[in-house]
Amino acid sequence: MKTHANCLLPLGLAVMCANATAAVTLYEDDTHSVSTDLLVNVFYTNSSVDRLADFNDANSGTVSRDQSRVRVGFLPNYIGFNYNTETDDGLKIGARSSFWVTLNDTDTQRGAEGLGTRSGIDVRQFYATVDAEWGQVLLGKDFGLFSRSNILTDELLLGHGQTSDFYGLIDGGNVSFGNIGSGYTYPFPKAQITYRSPDMSGVQIAVGVMDPNKKSATSSEDNPRFESEITYNNTFDSVDFKAYINGVTQSSEDSAGKTDSNGVGGGIRVGYAGAAFNASGFNTEGLGDVAGLDTLISNEQTESEGYLLQGSYSIDAERFVLSYGKTEVETQGTTSLEYENYAVAWFHTVNANLSLVGEYNRTEVNEGRTEENNTFAVGAVVTF
């Protein structure tokens, strides 16, 4: 499962998060504008882990170790560029490109990741948009729609998250996982053509045709991958309310047979007078429990389901979060993986560009083997 830490290099959704950063304008006239935005975060972490020495032999004993790191959190560092113009025919044309990097890549002893200061630039977004009265069409590479709002409403999005050895995250040269794998899956960036409706009294519908995920190197996908999401946002007597439902479907076939991959997710977030409650969940068949990549799961008898429950309270410059997430994977009716993460976090807003974070995560994994991981993290997040 340590390959997950590589296939998600690096993770990131900062530019779309609920507390989005204010961009810096580089150029602006009557019809054109160019702006840039940036995020830098770094944490000191200490992970204490107990796990079976040989994951394939429950009688082989237990390994305990502590590991200190200086690393990025759930989100990598990124810089993005935004372009907007309005044409004579009333269309609004936009574009975004964003480039993501990690920090903790200098230790040449980190196994296959030991490549020195590689800081590989990863393009997660490179798309254009066309807006009009009838809605918006997005053309290019962006995050998927399935599980999109699940992850964007995570109260710990700008925090650190869990670093389980099960996914190779303690020593990984990349990001942590947040609550990926312990409550939701990752909406992996894909080439897509996506339509979003206008806001209809708080309701917005998005439907995307996307480049399919390969089941194997020789698999055949006769049709593209389809993802969709319906969101509802409104305020009732000072109560902020958000609800959403999203889904995915795809078929893939190779010499081992045909796999129909389907998933549904959803959730709600309610906020009032500084307090907020967030709940989300998902259920999939024939998809991975981490990134929804069909290459990780090769049959329809594999089912994944998970949920995330969170509460937060904000007062003045302080925000406090309690979080619990769980994912279960079943193969042929037998539970083969249980993955849980408990978290508590404190966020302190110094000013509009700087926040301080303190966080504790306890991760428990059971997959015919056992891991208990306690991770403490303190760090800072800088945005422009």
Image (cartoon, grey):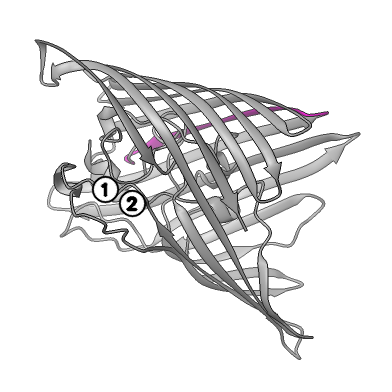
Looking at the figure, which quarter contains the C terminus?
A: bottom right
Q: Residue at x 32, y 30 (%)?
A: 68
Tag 1–tag 2 contact (CB < 8 Å): yes
x, y (%) of residue 275? 75, 26
Query: Is 58 displayed left or right of 269 in the figure?
Result: left
Amino acid type, mark 1: Asn
Q: Is residue 284 magenta?
A: yes
Query: Which residues make up the magenta segment?
Result: 273-287
Residue 6 numbered mark, or none: 1
Q: Residue at x 79, y 86 (%)?
A: 30
Between residue 94 and residue 346, name the one nearer to us. Answer: 346
Amino acid type, mark 2: Leu
Q: Helix, strand or loop at disc 1?
A: helix
x, y (%) of residue 261? 35, 45
Q: Residue furthest bottom?
A: 88
| Mark 2, residue position | 9
| Count of picture labels | 2
